[in-house]
Image (cartoon, rainbow, N blue to C red):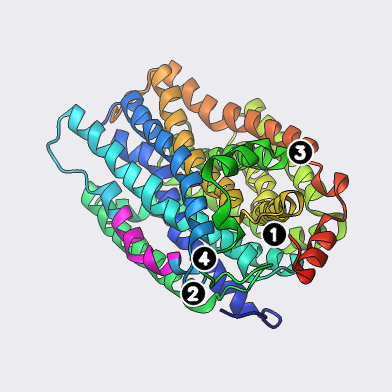
Amino acid sequence: MEKTIGKMRQRDFWAYGVGVLGISVTTQLISQLSFFYTDKVGMAATVAGIALAVTKIADAVTDLVMGQIVDRTNSKWGKARPWMLWMAFPALLAVLGLLCMPQGLSDTGKFIYAVVSNILATAVICTAISVPYACLLAFRTTDQNERTSMNVHRTICNFATGMFFSVGFIPLTNLMGGTQAAWIKVGVMVGAVAVAGMLICFWKTPEVSIGEDTSKKENRADTVPFGTSVHRLFSNKYWVIMAIAQLISNIIYSFTASTTVYYAKWIFGSENLMAVMGIIGFIPTMLGFFVISPLVRKFGPIKVVRIGFAIGVMGAIIRIVFPYSFIAVCAGGALISLSTMPFMMVGMVLIAGIADFEEWKNGDPMVGMINSASSFGAKVGGGIGSGLILWVLGMFGYVSKAAEQTATAIQGVLVVCNWIPGIMVAILLVLMFVYDLDKKYPNFREELSARRAGGEK
């Protein structure tokens, strides 16, 4: 185990960044499952929504359990890093399991298959990737600027995956025939890319010692009982805020990724217009990669995140006021996408800071448990988002595989595309005004560094 490490280089940041493919490919695919279930395998919208939601019950438990497992992992590679190796090929199996629903199943059989495949993909495999991956940010370096740069590169890779699924995934499956078999073929391709990203991350992202030697058989995290760890999490105001914010933000990501195809097909008349809508939204978001980091360094992450969510509220209002204007819908959607960029780029850094705060406050490092907030938000938020879309569409009378939809069903499309994301961005804005860690405890990191250097608990 390395005790020290030199200044990180660009290739180090990218090596960490591509590791997110093991998570984002699965979560982005799940965001497309609502359309896959209703329009490709013929499940009723409400039934498909229930199937996606049921799996999140398991996710709520396994993320916390995996956090404890990471804290107790001791290997020659560290605590979090080995999981990127161990779970690389299972990540591909998770993708295939989601898409390989056997032909000819009854409605009950489809429901059971959807539940089981989603539990295996998200509650088991994706959990065993996402929690350790989030912890790597804290184990790789203690420098806040380097942590921010790592998360920026993770965000870029995650965003690139999201853009592919938003802009290219369905058109590519349509190019290959638009059938379930076409979805499976494309799934194999993106799953292979995920495996490669995880292996690169494992190979090029060593852990460093943070306050203790993680190669030892025992450390302080091993002595914290699971029940005590859970109690501390939910007693930590900032962890609770961040867990809720991660959950809601990932519901928004799921909505923006999943609903564009419904908007393009039923409001503007063509599924393939989703590619045009995605590209228009891509331009200002790319601008965000260049301007957000300097703004964060100048004003601090929380202020920039608040401004971002305020912009998202304005974008939602534009779409609500002008729902049938292609230009207004694309412009409003671009603002909503841009609004989530600051939080996407610094969210894991904020969580790493909460792990430092917890260690400063109680003396025991709980990096794995704290970082379960990120994993929980990504998977549960994505699943709830997909399920919520289907529930709302079902409530408004959306009919799977129908050539036409009723006026009421069209209103349901507008609700899931415009109203719900707008309300959620507004909630995020409120939450970020409640988050005051650095303002209330401005010097805890310096005190923690001094304590670690002195070997104090």
Q: Is residue 87 visible?
A: yes
Q: Report the amino acid beneath label 3.
A: Ala
For disc 1, the marked residue is 287
**Residue 77, label in figure:** 2
User: What's the distance in space between the residues labelled 2 and 4, CA to CA?
Assistant: 7 Å
Mark 4 belongs to which amino acid?
Lys
Q: Nearer the viewer, mark 3 or mark 4?
A: 4
Q: Whole-percent x and y of residue 297?
A: 82, 62
Amino acid beneath label 2: Trp
Give the magenta range. 83-94
What residue is drawn where x is 43% and y is 55%?
Answer: 128
The mark that comes first in sequence, 3 or 4, is 4
Label 3, on which residue?
310
The secondary element bearing badge 3 is classed as helix
Q: Residues within 10 Å of mark 1 (few under 14, many from 20)?
A: few
Q: In x, y percent, where is residue 139?
A: 61, 67
**Which residue is drawn at the image coordinates 22% and 48% (left, top)?**
100
Compute the Cα span from label 3 to label 4: 38 Å
| Image point (58%, 60%), residue name | 135
Mark nearer the viewer, 1 or 3: 3
Q: Position of residue 98 (x, y in %)?
A: 30, 47
Residue 260 visible? The answer is: no
Q: Are marks 4 and 1 in contact (CB under 8 Å)?
A: no
Question: Is tag 1's residue or tag 3's residue first in the polypeptide sequence?
Answer: 1
Residue 92 drawn in magenta: yes
- Residue at image position (54%, 25%) is 415
Q: Are marks 2 and 4 in contact (CB under 8 Å)?
A: no
Q: Residue furthest left?
A: 104
Counting residues from the start of the chain, the first of labels 4 and 1 encountered is 4
